[in-house]
Amino acid sequence: MTVLPQPTCRTERLSLRPFVRSDSAEVQRIAVVKANSPHPDPDGLAAA
């Protein structure tokens, strides 16, 4: 399998880049925060 390089997209106010291993602690922190946040829509609403 060939892994293609991922581009970095930049605007004046935003920079999106591929994840790197050093991002893992921050990604884990955000995942925990989001998992404990209530979602405003009931389950199944998106499928309706």
Image (tube, rainbow, N blue to C red):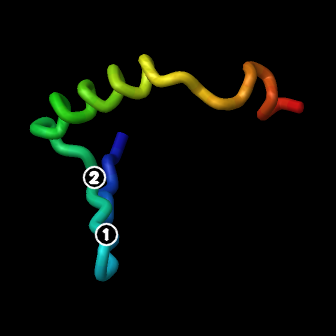
Label 1: few (<14), some (14–19) or many (≥20) C-alpha neighbours in 10 Å: few
The image's mark for residue 4 is none
- Residue at mark 1: 14
Tag 2: amino acid: Pro
Tally the numbered discs: 2
Q: Nearer the viewer, residue 11 or 1?
A: 11
Residue at the extreme right of the image, as rendered: 48
Helix, strand or loop at label 2? It is: loop
Q: Whole-percent x and y of residue 7? A: 31, 65
Image height of 38 relative to 27, above or below? above
**Residue 5 found in image quarter:** bottom left
Residue drawn at 83 percent across, 30 percent down:
47
State left or right for residue 19 relative to residue 46. Answer: left
Q: Whole-percent x and y of residue 31? A: 35, 26
The image's mark for residue 18 is 2
**Residue 42 found in image quarter:** top right
State left or right for residue 1 relative to residue 21. Answer: right
Q: CA distance from mark 2 to mark 1?
A: 13 Å
Image height of 34 relative to 15, above or below? above
Q: Nearer the viewer, residue 37 or 18?
A: 37
Image height of 6 relative to 27, above or below? below
Tag 1: amino acid: Leu
Helix, strand or loop at label 1? It is: loop
Q: Nearer the viewer, residue 4 or 48?
A: 48
